[in-house]
Image (cartoon, rainbow, N blue to C red):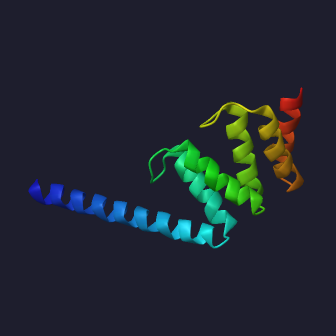
Amino acid sequence: MIRLFTSLLLFLCVNVGAANTNVESYKQSCDGGDVFSCGLLGSMYQWGDGVGHDALKAIDFYEKGCVGGAGYSCLMLGGMYGEGLGVQPNISEALKFLDMACEMKIEAGCVKSKWLRN
């Protein structure tokens, strides 16, 4: 029983350490201009996946990704503004980012933008 507990504890510590290393690696990549890493970090913070849930950090990372040309980051950012996740709901900001996603050929951005305008 002690051996099982020790193995489980070691497994958890290694995975947490690996997750923290990945987060730091993604942050460095995002800071270096890798918009995919920015969007990935936004998603991780939005859903609390491997990091603490932090909607404001999610918005910051999605915005870096969106401004850098990552359409899915624009889509997610538009959704957060439209639904008021981590920010006050702001339809004009939501539409701005959803339209950017649409311009980047992300069909869901076009659909959501049209839906918000009706």
Please name whichever residue, 33 or 12, is drawn nearer the observer in this view of the structure: 33
Task: Give the image location of residue 115, x and y in percent.
Answer: 85, 31
Task: Give the image location of residue 5, x and y in percent.
Answer: 17, 55
Residue positioned 57% across, 57% down in the render = 41
Give the answer, above or below, for where 24 lies relative to 1.
Answer: below
Q: Specify the farthest residue to the left.
A: 2
For the C terminus, which image quadrant?
A: top right
Answer left or right for 8 relative to 86: left
Residue positioned 23% across, 57% down in the render = 8
Answer left or right for 104 relative to 45: right
Please name whichever residue, 60 or 112, is drawn nearer the observer in this view of the structure: 60
Task: Give the image location of residue 108, x and y in percent.
Answer: 80, 44
Residue positioned 68% across, 32% down in the render = 83
Q: Quadrant of residue 11?
A: bottom left
Answer left or right for 100 relative to 57: right
Task: Give the image location of residue 114, x and y in percent.
Answer: 89, 35
